[in-house]
């Protein structure tokens, strides 16, 4: 049993009061500019009475904007009388990162999605992870965490879940992804980082999905519409909000199964891609070349895919340094 959280919620998370309640999670942070200061993370509870509890989060990474936009719209626009259940909504989850428009927090360098299950005595980001894990996840049955490629990457719109050994949970995750009205549904193998929010949710038995929509530190009408469709498709699937209209088209289910799905820069320079987002590539195919920035006549370094697959994510900034991921693939499930 870990130490209790020092984060205080304005809202009683056990009270079931019909309507929309707004408040803040208050993360204490005593600092030079504000001796008794707190970091006020906005939280909303939209309660329609009997039904499941659902956690909706965006701004886990502060430079990923689609979810931040649609969850703010949801808080203002959704009449909780239409709900059968309860939504706990945090549209600016890692608030310092959101305010800075950065992936990680400028206060402590914390990447919230690499800090679960958190630490009640750590920095502000680790404290927040611990609060989410110990106080929010145990109160919900379903959760969706909204992501995009952030400042450095761009994604095809996709629902995403972490693979699990629990067949019943895997079936529920896949069904939820299929309802999210996105063209792709990716299952990421459990060898990937386990310190994420959705991984923490799964560890607590929550049917926890994520989505990756757009990126490049920007928004487009299409990416916002995709995020809104994912949100409402998910809520409809959970049974908390009934949608009119035709059912979602079936997405293409694919896997991200290992390190050979990721391609990294091997030298510093200007990456000139030869492939684009959404292209299907062959094993050994050239992904692009890296030109030296400071030696005009140096031969370029070429990068090649280790395997075949669909390019679901690409790097946005043209300059690369060794270790930057320039693209990653998804593949059809094996036989
Ligand atoms: Zn993210």
Image (cartoon, rainbow, N blue to C red):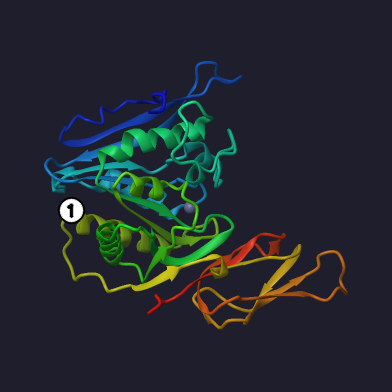
Report how many numbered discs are placed on residues in the image.
1
Residue 72 in view: no
Whether residue 292 can be seen here? yes
The quarter of the picture where the C terminus appears is bottom left
Whole-percent x and y of residue 122? Answer: 52, 29
308 relative position to 237: left or right: right
Q: Is residue 120 above or below residue 58?
A: above
Q: Is residue 106 left or right of residue 57?
A: right
Q: Quadrant of residue 226?
A: bottom left
Q: Is residue 184 left or right of residue 17?
A: right
Which quadrant of the rendered structure holds the N terminus? Answer: top left
Q: Mark 1, residues whose alpha carbon is within 10 Å: few (<14), some, or many (≥20)?
A: many
Determine the image quadrant of residue 47. Answer: top left
- Residue at image point 42% right, 55% down: 66
Residue 24, placed above or below residue 248: above
Q: Splitting the image into 4 quarters, where does residue 92 fall? A: top left
Residue situated in front as seen by the camera: 322 or 168: 168
Residue ranking furthest to the left: 50
Identify residue for label 1: 241
Q: Is residue 88 left or right of residue 3?
A: left
Question: Looking at the image, which residue is at 40% across and 77% down?
Answer: 334
Residue nearest the viewer, comparing 110 with 214: 110
């Amino acid at each position: 049993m870990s130490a209790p959280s020092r984060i205080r919620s304005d809202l009683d998370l056990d009270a079931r009061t019909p309507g929309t309640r707004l408040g803040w999670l208050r993360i204490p942070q005593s600092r030079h500019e504000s001796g008794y200061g707190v970091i006020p993370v906005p939280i909303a509870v939209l309660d329609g009475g009997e039904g499941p509890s659902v956690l909706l989060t965006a701004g886990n990474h502060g430079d990923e904007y689609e979810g931040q936009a649609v969850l703010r719209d949801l808080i203002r626009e959704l009449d909780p009388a239409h709900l059968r259940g309860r939504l706990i909504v945090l549209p600016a989850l890692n608030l310092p990162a959101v305010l800075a428009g950065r992936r990680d927090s400028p206060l402590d360098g914390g990447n919230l999605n690499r800090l679960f299950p958190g630490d009640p005595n750590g920095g502000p980001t680790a404290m927040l992870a611990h609060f989410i894990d110990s106080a929010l996840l145990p109160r919900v049955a379903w959760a969706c965490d909204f992501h995009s490629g952030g400042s450095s990457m761009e994604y095809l719109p996709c629902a995403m879940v972490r693979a699990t050994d629990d067949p019943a949970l895997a079936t529920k995750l896949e069904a939820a992804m299929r309802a999210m009205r996105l063209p792709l549904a990716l299952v990421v193998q459990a060898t990937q980082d386990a310190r994420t929010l959705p991984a923490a949710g799964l560890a607590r038995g929550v049917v926890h999905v994520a989505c990756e929509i757009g990126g490049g530190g920007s928004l487009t009408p299409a990416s916002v519409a995709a995020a809104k469709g994912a949100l409402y498709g998910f809520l409809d699937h959970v049974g908390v909000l009934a949608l009119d209209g035709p059912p979602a088209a079936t997405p293409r289910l694919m896997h991200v199964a290992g390190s050979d799905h990721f391609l990294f820069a091997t030298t510093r320079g200007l990456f000139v891609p030869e492939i684009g987002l959404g292209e299907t590539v062959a094993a050994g195919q050239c992904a692009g070349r890296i030109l030296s920035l400071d030696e005009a006549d140096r031969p370029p370094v070429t990068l090649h895919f280790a395997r075949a697959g669909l390019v679901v994510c690409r790097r946005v900034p043209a300059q690369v340094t060794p270790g930057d991921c320039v693209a990653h693939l998804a593949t059809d499930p094996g036989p």
